Amino acid sequence: DGEGSAIVTQLQGIRDPRAVADAAARIPGARFFDQKEFFRRVYSEYRSRIVLVVISGCFTVFALLLLRYRAWRPALAAALPSMLVGCLLTAFAAATGMPTHILHLIGLILVMGMGVDYGIFVWDSAGHPEETRATLHSLLLSALTTIFVFGAMGLSSHPVLHAIGRTTALGIALAFVLAPTSLVLVGRRPVA
């Protein structure tokens, strides 16, 4: 803090961080820094902000799709895979009790961004057999390469790579499957 020297030491095996913090508070000039608690609070704050960003992003994307298609049906068909993936991944995490943190949300943002692309491509090619077939083949190849890359990250023992990789690989697989399904749900069937 600019007032002199400091000694920093790492404590391990602490069972009661609160008791250590209380003891350190009684020593003049001593400070206890609980790294886990600090990151928990920071991640909690960022997680709340990211959830707001995801929700506002969904509305913004849907508004852009409405501007592009000038009708709610194609806008909904293009956006539906992305929105459904977000809901399904969140529901899966809740149902399995899988702890989620900011890195899972970052993976979710990646998936939702790519998922809306899949919806747009499928909607724009629907009704044209040759284009639909070519689009679905291209999307399959694109989805598989993305799944393999992020799936490899998901196999990592490093928590950051594991969280982003697993969320993104599973989400892209769902986005690919849901892209043509959204046409059926909205009412325009692809001819393939």
Image (cartoon, helix red, strand yellow):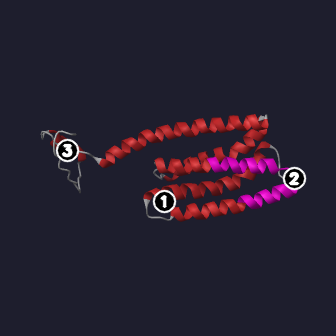
Q: Which amino acid does label 2 sit on?
A: His
Report which residue position mark 2 lands on.
128
Quadrant housing the N terminus: top left
In what element is the residue under mark 3?
helix
Q: What residue type is labelled 1?
A: His
Q: Which of 15 and 110 is in front in this view?
A: 110
Left or right: residue 79 versus residue 109 is right
Which sits earlier in the primary sequence, circle 1 or circle 3? Answer: 3
In the rendered image, residue 131 lying in the magenta stretch gets the answer: yes
Q: Give the range drawn in magenta.
A: 113-139
Which residue is found at the position 78% from the left and 38% from the top? Answer: 69
In what element is the residue under mark 1?
helix
Report which residue position mark 1 lands on.
162
| Label 1 CA crowd tier, 10 Å (few <14, some 14–19, many 20+) | many
Report which residue position mark 3 lands on.
19
Left or right: residue 71 versus residue 101 is right
| Label 3 CA crowd tier, 10 Å (few <14, some 14–19, many 20+) | few
